[in-house]
């Protein structure tokens, strides 16, 4: 079994900051890419940021310069530092890991999501 647990969401004013965390646990052999997505009401799920096993990163144009993704491989954890938040950043943030569970092959695993609300 693999579990992905997110934390760090909440309500913040425009211009504020939040730091999201997502920890993977269970019978994990290896983790490849880790990423953050967001789902806003009435909109499609979109990729916000991703980080490879070699620490290469990519970001959605809308968050470049404001958000930073990082990972701690020893803790199987990915972070998303969000600064200069805007109301349009509001949504449910979900983490995803491409990982190899012991006894299986590479698969996508998702967290349950954490709500981020930015008030104007």
Image (cartoon, helix red, strand yellow):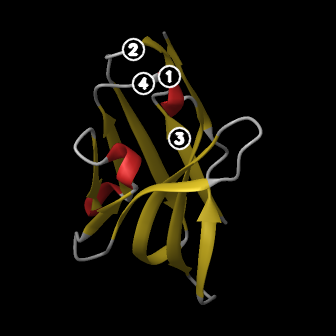
Note whether 46 is above or below 58 in the view shown: above
Residue shown at the point (39%, 46%) measured from the top left: 62
* Residue 76 vs residue 82, the one in the foreground: 82
Q: Position of residue 3 (x, y in %)?
A: 61, 56
Tell me the crowding category of disc 3: few under 14, some 14 to 19, or many 20 or more residues within 10 angstroms, Cα based: many
Label 4 Cα crowd, 10 Å radius (few <14 / some 14-19 / many 20+): some
Q: Is residue 6 left or right of residue 112?
A: left
Measured Cα–Cα span from mark 1 to mark 2:
6 Å
- Do labels 1 and 2 touch, CB within 8 Å? yes
**Among all residues in the image, which is located at the extreme right?**
42
Task: Check residue 87 in the rendering and tell me which mark sits there, or answer none.
Answer: 1
User: Mark 1 packing: few (<14 Cα in 10 Å), some, or many (20+)?
Assistant: some
The residue labelled by disc 4 is 86
Q: Earlier in the sequence, mark 4 or mark 3?
A: 3
Are discs 4 and 1 less than 8 Å apart at CB? yes
Q: Nearer the viewer, residue 89 or 92?
A: 89
Badge 2 is on which residue? 14
Q: Earlier in the sequence, mark 1 or mark 2?
A: 2
The picture places residue 10, in percent across and down from the top left corner, at 52, 19
Question: Which residue is painted at 63% across and 41% down in the image?
Answer: 113
Reply above or below: 89 against 70.
Answer: above
Cα separation between marks 3 and 1: 21 Å
Circle 2 crowding by C-alpha within 10 Å: few under 14, some 14–19, many from 20:
some
SS label for mark 3: strand
Q: Nearer the viewer, residue 82 or 60?
A: 60
Task: Decide: is 73 above or below 107.
Answer: above
Say how many tags the image has.
4
Instruction: Check disc 3 and report the residue beneath it.
Output: 6
């Amino acid at each position: 079994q693999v579990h992905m647990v997110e934390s760090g969401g909440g309500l913040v004013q425009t211009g504020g900051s939040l730091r999201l965390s997502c920890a993977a646990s269970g019978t994990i052999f290896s983790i490849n890419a880790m990423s953050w997505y967001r789902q806003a009401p009435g909109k499609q799920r979109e990729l916000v940021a991703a980080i490879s096993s070699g620490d290469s990163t990519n970001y959605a144009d809308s968050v470049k310069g404001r958000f930073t993704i990082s990972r701690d491989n020893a803790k199987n954890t990915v972070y998303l530092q969000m600064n200069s938040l805007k109301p349009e950043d509001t949504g449910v943030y979900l983490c995803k890991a491409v990982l190899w569970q012991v006894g299986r092959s590479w698969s996508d695993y998702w967290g349950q999501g954490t709500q981020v609300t930015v008030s104007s």
